[in-house]
Amino acid sequence: MLILGIESSCDETAASVVKDGKEILSSVISTQIEEHKKYGGVVPEIASRRHCENILEVVEKALSDSEKTLDDIDAVAVTYAPGLIGALLVGVSFAKGLAISANKPLAPVHHIAGHIAANYLTHHELEPPYLCLVASGGHSHIVEVLSHTKFRIIGRTRDDAAGECFDKCARAMGFPYPGGACIDKASKIGDASEFKLPHPKVAGNEFDFSFSGLKTNVINLVHNAEQKGIELNFNNLAASVQKTISEILTEKTINAAKSLGYKTVAVAGGVSANSGVRNSMEKSCAENGMKLYLPELSLCGDNGAMIACQGYYNYINGITADSSLNAAATLSLEDL
């Protein structure tokens, strides 16, 4: 079965053809990073306009690279929530028009479910149930994956997402957008022991995250040093930030796995590309006798292949949509 996946929830216009939810026949991504870099972050209006300009060419190339035609496609999958509403509407509108004109079924995909599905493309043997940490610029969730289409959120951020914390700390240190990759690179030559950063506590759910206090601590540290004329070693501070975020994500996820009795753990989302997070999770899972699944680096960020993969599972489980499908800026994974 061939699924065409379309992704436009933020600043990547992406499309992919995936066979049977496992084999990537093509994956095309048009990124806007260089354009948004001068603003220090994604500008929603610019993102939407670029999606409008790029989506037809991206989808055509995905079909061409797969050596398939639209007639060969069994269903069209598209991200419809959550994300930037203008950006989502471009993908949803295009996918609806394509599906209607070609008389193909339309499979709506939740963006976080798509990230989780990236692991099925890397690890064909992975099957639910298992526990998954999903961390990106917009989300930080610990998710109980009950089936390919059913999820339960065990923990979530109360404020900033992990990726947002990386980016804003990086910006305070003068690194360009996107800052997460810059912190990862700087941390490799930095000494994480120089700065002792806080591990914010969260009242209520022991598996919830909070990163705003850590972000504020780093911003204040940098600003205070500037006011006093003190030069900070930003490589060391970057290493400390990465170590702290990695420890928080790992500790909460492993504790949740222990509490729920899971021996299989996965990580997904853009932050899963971070070397500190990957190393921390690998070490902790090995120490606790847990099997860890990580997506290959090319599938950590937003891409069409993960949407096609999740679209496959949605479609075979009867989850489809008609022309009334609309985009949603916010939607819980549990409300599917």
Image (cartoon, rainbow, N blue to C red):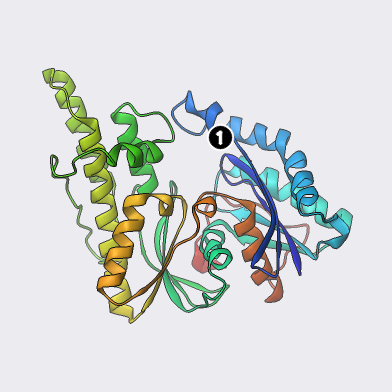
> Measured from the top left, where is residue 52 in percent x and y?
71, 36
Numbered circles on residues, count: 1
Which quarter of the figure is the N terminus placed in?
A: bottom right
- Rendered residue at 17%/45% (across/down): 197
Which of the 4 image quarters holds residue 49?
top right
Q: Which residue is mark 1?
A: 44
Camera-side residue of 248 and 264: 264
Disc 1 crowd rating (10 Å Cα; few below 14, some 14-19, many 20+) is: some
Q: Amino acid at mark 1?
A: Pro
> Measured from the top left, where is residue 221 in percent x and y?
17, 32
> Measured from the top left, where is residue 74 in percent x and y?
80, 66
Camera-side residue of 82 and 177: 177
> Measured from the top left, where is residue 202 in percent x and y?
23, 58
Whether residue 158 is visible to the viewer of this picture, yes or no, is: no
Camera-side residue of 69 and 252: 69
- Rendered residue at 28%/64% (across/down): 283
Relative horizontal placement of residue 231, taking residue 146 as reference (left or right): left
175 is higher (above) or lower (below) than 297: above
For numbered disc 1, what is the local secondary structure? helix
131 is higher (above) or lower (below) than 40: below
- Rendered residue at 17%/48% (across/down): 198
- Outermost residue to the bottom: 261
- Rendered residue at 28%/46% (across/down): 242
Relative horizontal placement of residue 185, taking residue 251 as reference (left or right): right
Camera-side residue of 125 and 272: 125
